[in-house]
Image: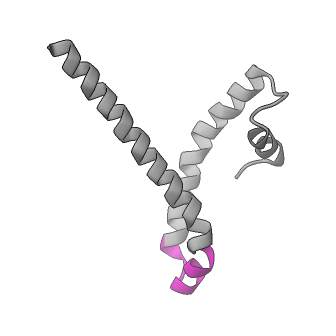
Amino acid sequence: MLSNRTRKHLKSNWKGVSKNAKNRTLQRLRISVPSTFDDIVLISQKLSEKERRNIFNPETLTPVVKLYSDILQLKKTVEEKMFSSTHLERT
């Protein structure tokens, strides 16, 4: 999914990349990442069980599961802060 150049920029935390170039790349990622997830779902639905096991295994899925867990925790934190601030405004 990522070009070698984009991968390099991400790994270097955008070191030496102009703000404009970074913003353009992030905009492209906002568009392409959901499509990539859709492709992964399609692949998992259309491959045989054996083919799925070769692609989707603990080694490849562990980082995805960790990311999902981190996203859920972030969502929970944001919701708690929103509830807290809303609750404080009402009292």
> In the current view of this chain or complex, which residue is farthest to the left?
91
User: Residue 28: x, y in percent?
Assistant: 66, 36
Q: Residue 29: x and y, percent?
A: 63, 39
User: From which residue to which does the magenta span run?
Assistant: 45-55
Query: Could you tell me how many numbered marks the image carries?
Result: 0
Residue 30 occupies quadrant: top right
- Residue at horizontal 58%, vertical 59%? 63
Residue ID at (26%, 25%): 84
Residue extending farthest to the bottom is 50
Task: Please state the horizontal and vertical placement of residue 37, each as a whole percent of the image.
Answer: 54, 55
State yes or no: residue 56 in magenta: no
29 relative position to 74: left or right:
right
**Is the stretch drawn in magenta largely helix, strand or loop?**
helix
Left or right of 29 on screen, residue 6: right
**Residue 38 appearing in the image:** no
Residue 47: in magenta span: yes
Which quadrant, please, contains the C terminus? top left
27 w.r.t. 51: above or below: above
Residue 45 visible: yes
Q: Is residue 47 above or below residue 4?
A: below
Relative to 58, 22 lies left or right: right
Q: Nearer the viewer, residue 27 or 64?
A: 64
Position of residue 61 in the picture relative to residue 25 (left or right)? left
Is 4 in front, or is 64? 64
Q: Residue at x 56, y 86 (%)?
A: 50
Q: How is the image coloured?
A: one colour
Residue 34 locus on image (x, y percent):
53, 47
